[in-house]
Image: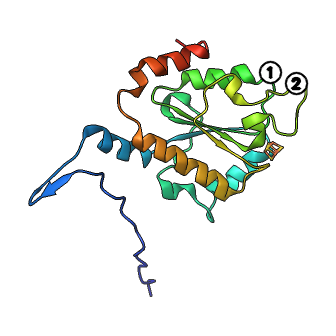
Amino acid sequence: MPRPVQYNTNVKMVEIPEGYSGEGFYATSFDKVIGLARKNSIWPLPFATSCCGIEFMATMAATYDMARFGAERMAFTPRQCDLLMVMGTISKKMGPIVRQVYLQMAEPRWVMAVGACASSGGIFDTYSVLQGIDQVIPVDVYVPGCPPRPEGIIDGFMRIQDLVHNEGLRRRNSEKYRELMESYGIK
Ligand code: SF4
């Protein structure tokens, strides 16, 4: 006898953006719709070098399941990704590689430094370890912890979603953004 089909009745719909609605119409601004779509379809690129990467594996597994946020499509192809998640100790030798991966990603792109090592070098205040990836690329969200628990990584991811949702479409063409890129030697 076939098993009865179990429907998931807990599906939650995202809230519609602010706008005006009436009978048969709904109007909002273009960047709110784009923000809504982008924030719920982020493609992360995990750049994991050490222990924080293990926490990330737990974050992707069944219990925490980041797919619930529309971000199940992990990729190691920078051109297809829009969120660089750097997890683990980054040595000075590895710095240029992180930067190269960042440069290969298309705009708009966001960066998350996961854990103490990626954010500040962590406990490794040594000659060989980069004291934070923000020395080589701009970072949008820092997740504290050594390692951060999956809840912390998910919280950081949700902060990224807030940024993605609220970013104006013209930000990447603004003078301020250009200055930020130039401060990292990126044209
Ligand atoms: S922050 Fe802690 S857990 Fe994460 S990579 Fe560094 S030493 Fe490992």
Q: Is residue 144 left or right of residue 140?
A: right
**Whether residue 49 is visible:** no
Q: Residue at x 84, y 28 (%)?
A: 129
Bin the neighbour count of mark 1 within 10 Å (Cα to Cα): few under 14, some 14-19, many 20 and up.
Answer: few
Label at residue 93 = 1
- Residue in view at x 55 percent, y 22 percent: 104
Looking at the rendering, in which quadrant would you find the N terminus? Answer: bottom left
Which of the two residues, 85 or 127, is positioned nearer the viewer here? 127
Give the residue displayed 61% in from the left and 32% down from the top.
Answer: 139
Specify whether residue 5 is in view. Answer: yes
Q: Mark 2 — residue?
A: 128
**Residue furthest out toward the right:** 126
Q: Secondary structure at mark 2?
A: loop
Q: Secondary structure at mark 1?
A: loop
Query: Which mark, by number, is residue 144?
Result: none
**Residue 64, percent across and down?**
61, 62
Image height check: is 86 above or below 156? Answer: above
Looking at numbered disc 2 in the image, what kind of residue is underneath it? Ser
Report the mark closest to the observer, 1 or 2: 2
In the image: residue 123, left or right of residue 164: right
Q: Amino acid at mark 1?
A: Lys
Q: Is residue 15 above or below residue 170?
A: below
Disc 2 within 8 angstroms of ligand 1 (CB) = no
**Where is residue 124, by image quadrant?**
top right
Q: Do the residues bearing badges 1 and 2 touch, measured as CB atoms within 8 Å?
A: yes
